[in-house]
Image (tube, grey):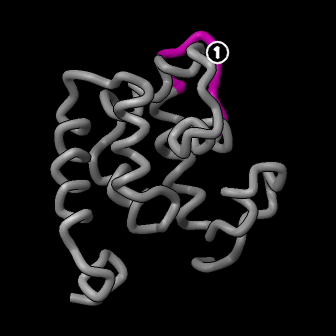
Amino acid sequence: MAGTPVEAFSEWHHIARMSKDAFENLTAAVTTINTPMPSRIDEGTLLACLKGEISERKWRVYVQALFDEVDVSVIHNLVIDHIVTFDELLKAIDAWQVTESENERWVREMASFAVGRSHAEGADRTR
């Protein structure tokens, strides 16, 4: 059901009020990131990394994998679903020193567009 909040992982305030569809998209990103890794990152930890709430270096490889391995449409949906903003993704790219990724370059480009818009022209506006 779209719009139904996800109750799991309620200790992560970013996830507590997330729609089921948004959570499923986030989970798809986490599943892709975790596939080749010997240990796992969860949805809440990834979001905290992207929002600058966690900076432990052990998570860098997972953040890098988001931009290297996850399809750009999944990353775009994270923004469309209001899970993160392009500005938050850009700050995460810089903080985690993400380099040499098509998705990293795309986020930089999208963030530059988002900064240049007035609120009335923002991502929430129907086109």
Residue to which mark 1 is pinned: 39
Residue 123 image point, x, y percent: 31, 75
Closer to the camera in the image, 32 or 112:
112
Closer to the camera in the image, 66 or 109:
109
Q: Quadrant of the N terminus?
A: bottom right
The vertical placement of 42 against 1, above or below, is: above
The vertical placement of 111 against 90, above or below, is: below
The answer to whether residue 115 is magenta is no
Magenta stretch: dominant secondary structure: loop
Q: Please report the residue visible at 75 percent of the width from the left and 62 percent of the height from the top.
A: 16
- Element marked by disc 1: loop
When asked about the image quadrant of residue 65, the answer is top left
The vertical placement of 126 against 92, above or below, is: below
> How many numbered circles are shown?
1
Q: Please report the residue visible at 53 percent of the width from the left and 50 percent of the height from the top.
A: 26
Residue found at the very far top of the displayed protein:
38
**In the picture provided, is 57 more to the left or to the right than 17?**
left
Q: Quadrant of the C terminus?
A: bottom left
When asked about the image quadrant of residue 48, the answer is top right
Q: Please report the residue visible at 45 percent of the width from the left and 33 percent of the height from the top.
A: 32
**In the picture provided, is 85 more to the left or to the right than 104?**
right
The answer to whether residue 40 is magenta is yes
**Magenta part of the protein: which range?**
34-42
Q: Please report the residue visible at 69 percent of the width from the left and 57 percent of the height from the top.
A: 15
